[in-house]
Amino acid sequence: MNHYVSHLEAAIDGTALPFGTLANMHNGRPIWVRYHLDKIRAAVTPDEIAKRPPSLWRYRELLPLPQYVEPVTLGEGMTPLLHCPRLGKQLGLSQLYVKDESQLPTGSFKSRGMAAAISMAKWLGVTRVALPTAGNAGGAAAAYAARAGIECFVFMPHDTPAVNQFEAQLYGAKAFRVNGLINDCGKIVKDGAERMGWFDLSTLKEPYRLEGKKTMGLELAEQFGRGLQGEPAGGSPSSAARGLQGEPAGGSPSREGWQLPDVIFYPTGGGTGLVGMWKAFAELAELGWLRASPGHPSGVRFPRLISCQAEGCAPIVTAYRKGERFAELFPNARTVASGLRVPVAVGDFMILDAIRASGGTAVLGRESEIARWMQRASSAEGISICPETAVCFDALERMVAAGEVKPDERVVVFNTGAAPKYLEAMPYNLPALDKDALDWDRIAG
């Protein structure tokens, strides 16, 4: 078999759609990719996956690109899951981890989605793509489009971080600043589709960025399957290879399989990563690749998803608090965490469904705390923390204090990008020294 996709499925009403043709949305809402999970279970085991190169493409059976097709790749590797004991101690947590997406080729988690989306677009014969961006997506799309030899158009708010503007142009995209927000840029992409002949790569307006982002959840489960009983995650390759040895075929959870954390803090703009991870967990459970949770009714306990948004742009938090399934346009959206400045998300109901199904919640991070948390977390652990992740840490600190996250729970915070891409987010002013009259007391601090 060349691929394991069974069909596409409309997220809003379950309508089955054919795979192998260009698809954007159904009735104005996103589309899922569905797989023959029984055939995947028969074709590959976690043991075999563990022996493959540490790449996004190690999960090839659970990705939509046919196996005979060469992916468009920039070497996107398996990102580290870093145990953070010093920062955890400050917060009162014994098992705090950061999944560091800043080490991907374009410096953010957007590499995952674009690797899958551009690979699929090239396979399906697309020669021109377009998308709106609030930050990192534009640069990632431009880079992967350049790698694929596809023409790329990027539209971004006029105050998008300078590095994001630079990289879109650097990679050869036709990039434009727009006097509006990302939804205004999205309207330009939509309105130009017929006239310009481009394929719309907007968040959740095609099915495959979601599948690329899904690999965050697959990696997380595999990495937690290595380090057990409080060990730092990311254990030895030999422990990672245990897989399902001796387990019968079928969908029952394994005692020796991959494992999930207790809580995930995820910065949520368009929400593709959060939704993708939840999809990954469901697929792994059905495959029987997840370790059993004794006493849990369904056999496997999934993590609580904590969707984090900045107070200046919080449509998902607002809808969650109101008990609604769909979010309204957030007025006057403003936040220095540019990736969270998404005032309306086409996948709002998918995000909110996942949060509620997980027993999680949607919380605000304070705008005034972003710069402080970038420095506090980065200096504690040496990880390049972006402003979107700083929002997560602000929310985490308050949830721990309120008893909503327990001291011994395994907590993962996703760092979705590299701090140097956000020079505007944290002002810096280094003291100057006179080389001819050094003030050692000042240097000593």
Image (cartoon, rainbow, N blue to C red):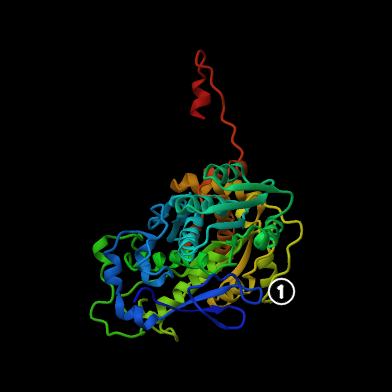
Q: Residue furthest top?
A: 436
Task: From the viewer's perspective, tell me whether residue 184 is left or right of residue 280.
Answer: right
Q: Is residue 29 above or below residue 314?
A: below
Q: Amino acid at mark 1?
A: Lys
Question: Which image quarter holds the N terminus?
Answer: bottom left
x then y, percent, for residue 351: 59, 71
Q: Nearer the viewer, residue 248 or 135?
A: 135
Q: Secondary structure at mark 1?
A: helix
x then y, percent, for residue 125: 49, 63
Q: Nearer the viewer, residue 75 or 301?
A: 75
x then y, percent, for residue 71: 40, 60
Q: Residues within 10 Å of mark 1 (few under 14, many from 20)?
A: few
Q: Is residue 405 above or below residue 176?
A: below
Whether residue 127 appears in this view of the structure is yes
Task: From the viewer's perspective, tell me whether residue 183 is left or right of residue 339.
Answer: right
Question: Can you tell which quarter of the image residue 426 is in?
Answer: top right
Q: Residue furthest right?
A: 331
Q: Identify the residue at horizontal 24%, vertical 77% (top origin).
A: 245
Q: Is residue 441 above or below residue 289?
A: above
Q: Nearer the viewer, residue 173 or 297?
A: 173
Q: Identify the residue at horizontal 62%, vertical 70% (top origin).
A: 347
Q: Identify the residue at horizontal 69%, vertical 76% (top origin).
A: 324
Whether residue 405 appears in this view of the structure is no
Q: Which residue is mark 1?
A: 322
